[in-house]
Amino acid sequence: MTASAASLEAQAKINLALRILAREEGGYHQLETLFARIDFADTVRVATDTHLRELQCSGAEVGPAEQNLAFRAAEAFMAEALWPRGFQISIEKRIPVRSGLGGGSADAGAVLRILNALAPTPLSDATLATLAFRLGADVPFLATNAPLALAWGRGERVLALNSLPAREVVLCFLPFGVATADAFRWIAESRADEPLRAPALIRAADIDRWDGVARLSHNDFETPVIQRHPEIATCLEALMAGGARVARLSGSGSTVFGIFERRSPATFQGLPEGTRVVGSRTLTTVAPVRLLD
């Protein structure tokens, strides 16, 4: 008897490097990024023995179900596979919204992976990647089982890399979020008179060690976002002063992370008021889908 329900830890991502490139005529920006998974996650459960289409979410307010990426991922899978007849999704949220950690995208990627594991006729990797791309730039990576990957374009071109040794990660959650659309608008405004930027073409050989990652680490969002939220610069400075090998804004923010070769300090000096600090780790393997009875 095949299972009709499964769960998955929808692990967050950080951007170890992120460059925003040319803007397309349709308004979308090309990008080049180095993604890494961390062991900070939402828990996603999907059941298919229903005619309903339902989403329940605890831990954060995520808006109407029909606009939620996880709900849209399930509908996209149904339309492509002509299966299942319905779904019930439950999400226990831990990844803050508008944090730059890809929480909504991780949930969507988890739904795609779960449904493909439950499906009587699974979709091909290429088809699943196409569905993921239609949902958002982070979803193609977060629908794979790669702990580390390069991505280009609008996130649709993903090259899985060999994982690096696990490192301790410190996440600084500031008491505000940054809307991705706002961050892209700030980038566009700051570059109105600049020439188009060409890809840097990061090579996998350049990032086979953490010291290579440290040399290449950069985030184009930092300058325009810090101009509006200087608290982010304060967090970066505190993490570096505490011994971080890499400290960056993740995605468009507002989360700031630090990578530590050895154990990080218990506390950091000078963090902005209201900052919540959470410990995590980079991953060498990604959580598998767990079938439920």
Image (cartoon, rainbow, N blue to C red):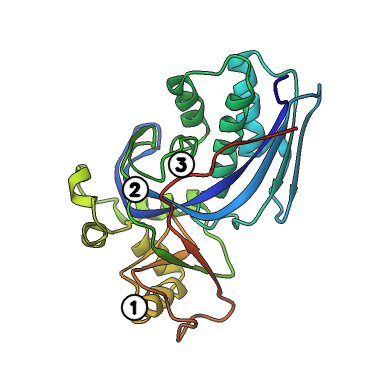
What is the quadrant of the N terminus in the image? top right
Residue at 44% of width from left, 46% of height from top? 285
Can you name the residue that lies furthest to the bottom here?
Answer: 269
Q: Depth check: 264 or 26 in front?
A: 264
Residue designated by label 1: 243
Mark 2 neighbour class, 10 Å CA radius: few under 14, some 14 to 19, many 20 or more: some
Q: Do the residues labelled 3 and 2 touch (CB within 8 Å)?
A: no
Badge 3 is on which residue?
138
Residue 209 location (% of width, % of height):
24, 56
Of labels 1 and 2, earlier in sequence is: 2
Q: Quadrant of residue 114?
A: top right
Residue identified by numbered label 2:
163
Residue at image point 64% right, 24% down: 118
Of 189 and 31, which appears nearest the observer?
Answer: 31
Depth check: give the residue in front, 137 or 44: 44
Whichever of callouts 3 and 2 sits on the residue coming sooner in the sequence is 3
| Disc 1 from disc 2: Cα separation | 23 Å
- Is residue 173 visible in the rendered image? The answer is no
